[in-house]
Image (spheres, rainbow, N blue to C red):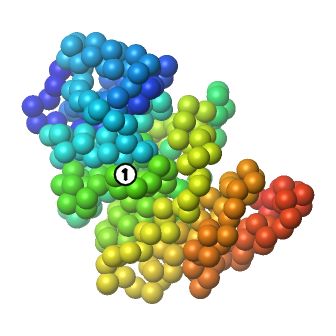
Amino acid sequence: MEHEINPFFSVVVPVYNKAKYLEEALESLYAQRYANLEIIAVDDGSTDGSWELLERHRDQGRIRLYRRDRPGPGGYAARNHGASMARGKWLVFQDADDWCADDHLAEFHASMKSTEAREINLYVNAYAKQWGDTVHPAIAFPHHGELTRQQGLELFARSDYIHMNGACIERQFFLDSGGFPEGIYRRGGDVYYWIRTLASMRRTHYNRKVTSHWKIDNCGISNNLSNLVNTHPARDALEGLPHDLTWKEVYYAKKAINRKLISWGVEKKRHGMAIAEDIKALHLEALSFRQILHCLTLLLPDNLFAHCRTLVGKTL
């Protein structure tokens, strides 16, 4: 793949000790039907051979490559650095241990062509979660196409319909927004960013077609319990939000934050961790009936918690 002088898409791949998965992730990008792209890999000080692998791909002219001396929590600083080096109008982020279909970028491009008269800075494709060889399809949301700010926040209050691999954001908007939070959160900083972004955009676009897989078994950040110690970063997402939000938009933003706080609390309780701060951070005025049920399970003794979780539901 030759570098495009003026690429339409810049795909940023943060890398930290992902040699085992990196070839597959990169090959899925090389196979894209829409070919006007550049791939920017940012290594965060890998020690497992990832850097040497990336050097080979760079020397073959397939990627642009940068290296940071110290790994940043959650890879957020690496993504921001890649974005600052990008030449494309649109940014796409690809985790080094995940995969995307060959029409991933083509679907983004088609969505843009269908809305080119609109001022839209964020396009989202659906994604699927993958455990081993088992793929769980994305939640079938009722919306498809252009979303108002309220609809975008309402969807996020239901589920994480935006995943890092499934988002395409206008590069200048991303840079002007300050990018992902660096050096603050080890996990969940992307959720913090998406909530704030949805609240700051008047419209976005959602495509129900699944074009990427989040391979959860490969995700060291999600599987590292030390990353759960503090309250979910979503708690801070309302700080400095636009003042022109309607009461319904604020309600759905708070409901989305509640969902993440409760989900985080459930995960912590399963591992015997304290959850008092997570409960205190909830926006009580935006709790749905289902969220209240989840909260009640968090207040149960540990010996009843697991049984009641099965009855209420495993996920938020």
Q: Position of residue 31 (x, y in %)?
A: 35, 23
Above or below: residue 219 compared with residue 279: above
Label 1, residues with CA under 10 Å away: few <14, some 14-19, many ≥20: some
* Quarter of the N terminus within the rendering: top left
The residue labelled by disc 1 is: 183
> Could you tell whether 305 is left or right of 87 in the image?
right
Q: Residue at x 69, y 62 (%)?
A: 274
Report the quarter where the C terminus lies. bottom right
Is 263 or 134 nearer to us in this picture? 263
In this rendering, the answer to whether 43 lies above or below 275 is above
Query: What residue is rendered at 25% in x and 59% in y?
Result: 178
- Position above or below: 84 against 5: below
State the image coordinates of residue 46 (x, y, percent, origin top left): 38, 25
Front residue of 227 and 156: 227
Residue 124 image position (x, y, % from top left): 40, 52
Place residue 267 in its image quadrant. Answer: bottom right
Seen in the image, is 254 located left or right of residue 312?
Answer: left
Q: Residue at x 21, y 27 (%)?
A: 64
Question: Disc 1 on helix, strand or loop?
Answer: loop
In the image: residue 276, left or right of residue 201: right
Q: Is residue 70 visible?
A: yes
In this rendering, does residue 206 appear at all?
no
